[in-house]
């Protein structure tokens, strides 16, 4: 938790940005049972609640009054029966005081607070819930049916929360640097342990253990797979085999829940084959080209920079043909990289996307507003600003089903050498990812002088020295 003044200032800044005449309702998360209530998944607080109220406790609701400098915290004090299992716990009043909230009340009073605002004709601003429990809670507080939340969510709140969370403060950058250190330990652990005969599960388990040693666990479910052509491959069932590439996309959270997200791809044997080296260096060049040019401006410019670098490299090795600019314009590189260059990073590994075009099932309500303000919730219109943190993660993947589909449709046949791609159906995929902070005139890579081995030479040398 940061100092309480941080949370007071954030709530006051939101109050300054939002239209008058209403309240903001920000529920925290509840426990999520694995198979019965007392056996729960590891608790993770809602990031927006955490951003404005800073408390890691379950079953709390924060309310910000937009017309008065008054904030509320609703929750129930623990009973002796709870304390038997949990030990002594602070009261809700004490929790509120720790983050600068004077007005506290039992959880049930949250509904009366919201209903009083509705009766007075005041606007109730809320974000669309992303968990079932949160959906039911918001319906209970507001009286709005669960299937109508998208129609009644607050575009003003979405836009302003995204804008505030996107521009990272110095103390947030410090937390992201701590998360980088966790990511560094995770990925170098994977390089040390990967060798023929070792289970992917063993590597993944060791990496995720690191996140609990130094932080608050993984920032997302780790991808540790020799089938890197499957973009979100969460299976760890393989056995490491020489000749294969291991793709590791993983990150950890600091104790204050700021995230890291890195990807490395390396040979199980510790040495790249000539073909693997060629494809790898194309991806690395695209990664580095983004580092050279990233600065305040449009995200899509960086995305297209990476695509052009990939096209030039693939033309160079005979897997594409023609002019690189024309190939990018035609969408031909999408066969090899069917995803965006990167995403926002902060308290979530896809920062604010729960309230964006990729998280909301119905984004139509706010698409016009999102187009005006250029935040991370709409990548096509995302304008990078000083303080923005994003990932740089180009990749090349040989996905047999996708290749067969495009080949059958003769899609982009002027640019793609389909006759050569059959040789790559067992190749897998390569992705390389680092986290960038946009500055006034350019960018810096999180981690400073410490970086996870990434060049062919660095990877091979590190693996040789630690096996």
Image (cartoon, rainbow, N blue to C red):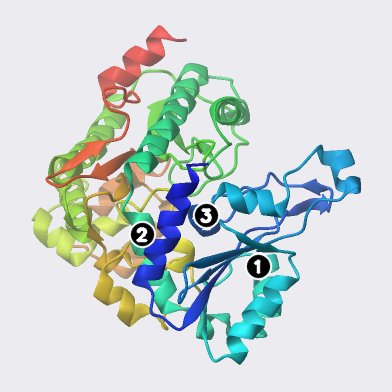
Cα separation, mark 3 vs mark 1, equals 13 Å
Nearer to me, 116 or 307: 116
> In this figure, which residue is indicated by the disc labeled 1?
134
Q: Which residue is mark 2?
A: 164
Q: Work out whether mark 1 precedes mark 2 in sequence or the reverse, and give the earlier one.
A: 1
Front label number (3 vs 2):
2
Q: Which residue: 47% across, 37% down?
A: 251
Q: Is residue 376 left or right of residue 323?
A: right
Q: Residues within 10 Å of mark 1 (few under 14, many from 20)?
A: some
Question: Quadrant of residue 42 in the image?
Answer: top right
Q: Residue at x 53, y 41 (%)?
A: 1
Q: In terms of sequence position, does the residue under pointer 3 or pointer 1 come before the other?
A: 3
* Image position of 400 (left or right of 276): right
Could you tell me which secondary element the residue under label 1 belongs to? helix
Residue 211, picture quadrant: top right
Q: Return the residue at label 3.
A: 47
Q: Is residue 161 visible?
A: no
Viewer-nearest residue: 438 or 225? 438
Residue in view at x 41 percent, y 51 percent: 399
User: Could you tell me residue 212's position as x and y percent?
Assistant: 60, 30
Q: Is residue 158 above or below residue 392?
A: below
Q: Earlier in the sequence, mark 3 or mark 2?
A: 3
């Amino acid at each position: 938790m940061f100092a309480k003044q941080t949370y007071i200032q954030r709530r006051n800044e939101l109050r300054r940005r939002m239209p008058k005449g209403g309240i903001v309702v920000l529920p925290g998360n509840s426990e999520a049972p694995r198979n019965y209530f007392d056996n729960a998944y590891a608790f993770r607080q809602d990031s927006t609640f955490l951003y404005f109220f800073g408390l890691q406790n379950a079953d709390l609701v924060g309310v910000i009054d937009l017309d008065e400098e008054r904030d509320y915290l609703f929750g129930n004090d623990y009973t002796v029966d709870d304390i038997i299992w949990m030990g002594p716990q602070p009261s809700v009043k004490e929790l509120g005081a720790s983050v600068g909230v004077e007005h506290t009340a039992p959880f049930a009073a949250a509904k009366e607070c919201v209903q009083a605002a509705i009766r007075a004709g005041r606007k109730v601003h809320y974000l669309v819930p992303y968990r079932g429990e949160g959906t039911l809670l918001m319906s209970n507080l507001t009286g709005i049916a669960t299937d109508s939340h998208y129609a009644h969510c607050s575009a003003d709140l979405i836009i302003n929360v995204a804008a505030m969370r996107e521009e990272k403060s110095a103390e947030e950058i410090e937390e992201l640097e701590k998360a980088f250190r966790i990511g560094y330990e995770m990925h170098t652990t994977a390089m040390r342990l990967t060798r023929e005969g070792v289970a992917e599960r063993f590597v993944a388990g060791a990496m995720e253990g690191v996140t609990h040693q130094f932080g608050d666990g993984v920032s997302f479910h780790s991808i540790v797979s020799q089938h890197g052509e499957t973009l979100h491959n969460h299976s760890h069932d393989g056995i490491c085999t020489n000749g294969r590439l291991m793709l590791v996309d993983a990150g950890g959270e600091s104790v204050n829940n700021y995230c890291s997200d890195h990807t490395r791809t390396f040979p199980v044997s510790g040495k790249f084959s000539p073909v693997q080296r060629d494809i790898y260096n194309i991806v690395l060049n695209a990664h580095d080209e983004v580092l050279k040019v990233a600065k305040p401006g449009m995200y899509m410019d960086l995305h297209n920079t990476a695509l052009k670098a990939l096209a030039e490299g693939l033309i160079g090795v005979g897997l594409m043909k023609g002019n690189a600019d024309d190939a990018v314009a035609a969408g031909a590189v999408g066969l090899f990289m069917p995803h965006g260059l990167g995403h926002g990073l902060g308290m979530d590994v896809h920062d604010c996307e729960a309230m964006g075009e990729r998280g909301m099932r119905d984004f139509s309500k706010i698409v016009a507003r999102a187009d005006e303000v250029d935040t991370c919730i709409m990548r096509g219109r995302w304008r990078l600003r000083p303080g923005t943190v994003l990932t740089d993660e180009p990749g090349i993947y040989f996905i047999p089903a996708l290749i067969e589909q495009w080949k059958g449709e003769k899609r982009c046949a002027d640019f793609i050498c389909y006759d050569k791609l059959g040789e790559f159906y067992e190749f897998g995929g390569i992705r390389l990812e680092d986290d960038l902070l946009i500055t006034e005139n350019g960018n810096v890579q999180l981690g400073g002088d410490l970086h996870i081995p990434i060049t062919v030479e660095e990877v091979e040398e590190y693996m040789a020295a630690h096996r």
